[in-house]
Image (cartoon, rainbow, N blue to C red):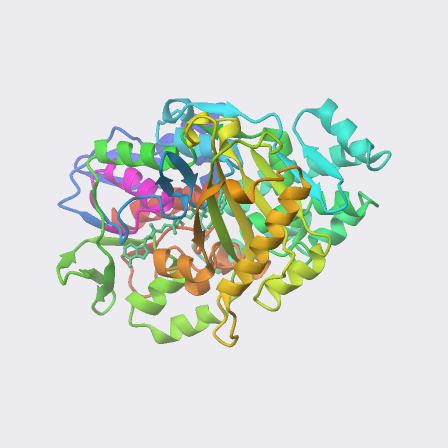
Amino acid sequence: MGPGQDRQSLADVVRILPCKIIIHVRYQNSINYIFSGVKINPNFSFMAGEKTVVIIGAGIAGITTSIYLSRQGYKVTVYEKNAAPGGRCGQITRDGHRFDLGATIYLMPEVYRKVFESLDIKPETLFESTPLPTLYNICFEDGTQIAFTPDKNKLRTELENIEKGSFSKSEKLVREGYENFQLAVENLLGRNFYTLSEFVTLKNALMLLKLNTHRRHINYIKQFFKNDHLRKAFTFQNIYVGQNPYEAPALFSMLPAAELTEGSLFPVGGMFSITKKLVDIAEASGVRFVYNSPVIKILTDRRRASGVVLENGSTIKATVIVANADLPYVYRELLPDQAAWNRLNRKQYSCSAIVLHWGLKKTYPQLEHHNVFLSASYRENLRKIFRDHSLATDPSFYVHAPVRSDPSAAPAGEDSLSIIIPSGYLDEGKNVSWTDLKNEARAYIIARLKKQGLTDIEENIKFEICYLPQTWKSVFNLTRGATFGLGHNIFQMGYFRPSNRHKKYKNLYFTGGSTHPGNGIPLVLLSAKLTSERILKEQNT
Ligand SMILES: Cc1cc2nc3c(=O)[nH]c(=O)nc-3n(C[C@H](O)[C@H](O)[C@H](O)COP(=O)(O)OP(=O)(O)OC[C@H]3O[C@@H](n4cnc5c(N)ncnc54)[C@H](O)[C@@H]3O)c2cc1C
């Protein structure tokens, strides 16, 4: 589709009639209008006949959906169980130290840009950002380090030092991975699938083959590199979405490819500054946020959801309800449908994570902004997480050290570090002491950081804030404490991922990581876009 045709499709997408809006979505091309500069008119307001929306949860997907809908004339109220917005893109502050509570990596900047542009928001007006010359430093236990960087000359040196000829192979890998990323965003992740027949087509079957969904990521990477460190360096990114690189489909080679192609930046003020700005924009569009207000029930009659009940006992009626709270939790706790929950309970879930936030008395220049420490028993580690739903005593982990690019994250001369340790999720069938596992992992991590030159780190920890799998469950209602929600295997993607609308209650929608297209901030932004598109199509005709 050429640019001229893109413009033309705006008229196809949104036709404005007096007092009424009819949305004509070309489903098969919906991504084209997301990513071609054509967008839902942000300034247009129509008489929605008192159409009201209740959104359950002020995560990134809930906030973004509220912007789309309020700008189309809906009266939107967001009820959030916690005292602040952002959910897994929230923030913790203490004694002048600031920590991103969950998300720390600004992945796939192009997806952010294009979603924001569809709302007439220029990302550069959202926040100030610092480009990161090194995406992350990958440290192996034998002392090998790889600085993963989009700077080709530097990357060449890094890779060639480890395996001769590996740089040119990495270029092929990244080129193919990025093409697949674009193809996936356009045809799989960035569009709604309303019917099975839209998903199961010859064209899509060929696309899924091209996207390498039938191959394991690790096996695919073995074609490119002999060296085990390089194989790990190009696959560990599966853990970003809670997957085991030894089991995930090779489609996810798009993750390092997108990072190496698009580069990375860091929003000054942390990832939470994205949340804050989106809330400001939503409020300016008329959205009302009500905090400390858990929803405890979604009211339903025959084929519709009529409202919600809050923990304080009040009932709020609405024309449309959007649940941003994690989808399996909504089916289990807020809806009467036990059979649907049973089906969801049988699905595959992503891993969880133990997170330690440390306020430190001094800065550690030995660390980059993002640091990945891979254990010598990496594969066994992953087995412990994904098969045993537990944690090894010598786990792989990641350290976020934002002060290097954003000094405002800690008092002058001090440091704020967040240590993320992927772990198993809460498994009712297993008797796991997460506190004991955390203590063992913590001792190992301190020893490992000492080896890295941070010799006095332990005595400089002023305070520690710890999130265990059960914390994720209790604070954000994440089923099993699975930090990345439902897993992303090929049987849980596209049409096969739980739909963004309830099958029976036709005005109850879902947005966020456990519905289509998946987890990670870029994908939940897309989710908000797709859910809003569906609501406008289905509720306004
Ligand atoms: C440790 C960790 C690291 C991560 N790292 C990255 C990263 O580097 N980059 C990246 O892109 N992504 C990352 N992610 C993933 C990313 O944070 C999530 O995919 C994204 O924030 C999910 O947004 P959401 O809107 O779907 O859900 P959530 O953020 O979970 O928001 C849902 C909201 O609903 C609220 N809620 C729940 N139940 C109720 C109720 N009954 N009533 C009212 N409100 C309710 C919750 O409190 C929450 O605020 C990470 C996640 C974690 C946990």
Seen in the image, is 167 located left or right of residue 342?
Answer: right
Which one is nearer the viewer's eye here, 351 or 50? 351
Question: Residue 470's x, y, as percent?
Answer: 42, 62
Above or below: residue 92 compared with residue 82? above
Q: Is residue 66 magenta?
A: yes
How many discs appear? 0
Q: Quadrant of residue 233?
A: top right
Seen in the image, is 83 located left or right of residue 34?
Answer: left
Identify which residue is drawn at 72% across, 36% down.
146
Identify which residue is drawn at 18% across, 48% down.
52
Question: Residue 264's x, y, as percent?
Answer: 56, 30
Question: Residue 69's x, y, as percent?
Answer: 27, 41
Q: Which residues are magenta?
A: 54-76
Above or below: residue 469 compared with residue 24? below
Q: Is residue 48 magenta?
A: no
Identify which residue is drawn at 24% across, 59% down.
295
User: Can residue 38 be seen from the camera position used here?
Assistant: no
Q: Quadrant of residue 47?
A: top left
Above or below: residue 328 compared with residue 533? below
User: Can residue 427 be seen from the camera position used here?
Assistant: yes
Seen in the image, is 234 located left or right of residue 238?
Answer: right
Question: Residue 155's x, y, as percent?
Answer: 73, 29
Which one is nearer the viewer's eye here, 271 or 107? 271
Which one is nearer the viewer's eye here, 48 or 479? 479
